[in-house]
Image (tube, rainbow, N blue to C red):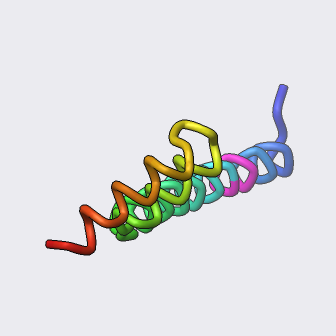
Amino acid sequence: MMNANTYGINLWVGWLAMAIGIAVVIYLVSRAERDYTQKVSAEDILKKRLARGEINKDEYRALKNMLTQN
């Protein structure tokens, strides 16, 4: 059987868990929005592709020249 003290502790633990859950959701949503709104230039994408080995230096130069001509 629960006494008044145990009920009060359980109530506070529940509120604390809910507050932590809400804080985590707010953090994740704000982080997702920040990542979504971050602009990445075409040249940055090319640099990353070159670094990963998806394109070689000649392809990088050709694509970069195409981007700067426009």
Residue at 50 percent across and 62 percent down: it is 31
* Place of residue 20 in the rendered image (x, y in percent of width and height, measured from the top left): 65, 56
Residue furthest to the top in view is: 1
Left or right: where 39 falls relative to 29: left
* Place of residue 7 in the rendered image (x, y in percent of width and height, measured from the top left): 76, 44
- Please say if 15 is above or below 42: above
Residue at 44 percent across and 56 percent down: it is 45
Q: How many marks?
A: 0
Left or right: where 63 falls relative to 54: left
Residue nearest the observer in this picture, 58 or 41:
58
On the rendered image, what quadrant is the C terminus found in?
bottom left
- Please say if 17 is above or below 69: above
Quarter assignment of residue 12: bottom right
Residue nearest the observer in this picture, 32 or 14:
32
On the rendered image, what quadrant is the N terminus found in?
top right
Residue furthest to the left in view is: 70
What stretch of residues is rendered in magenta? 12-16
Residue at 34 percent across and 63 percent down: it is 42
Residue nearest the observer in this picture, 61 or 20:
61
* Place of residue 19 in the rendered image (x, y in percent of width and height, measured from the top left): 60, 59
User: Does the stretch in magenta take in 41?
Assistant: no
* Place of residue 53 in the rendered image (x, y in percent of width and height, measured from the top left): 62, 39
Left or right: where 4 falls relative to 23: right
- Please say if 48 is above or below 38: above
Residue at 34 percent across and 55 percent down: it is 63
> Magenta-highlighted stretch: main secondary structure?
helix
- Please say if 43 is above or below 51: below
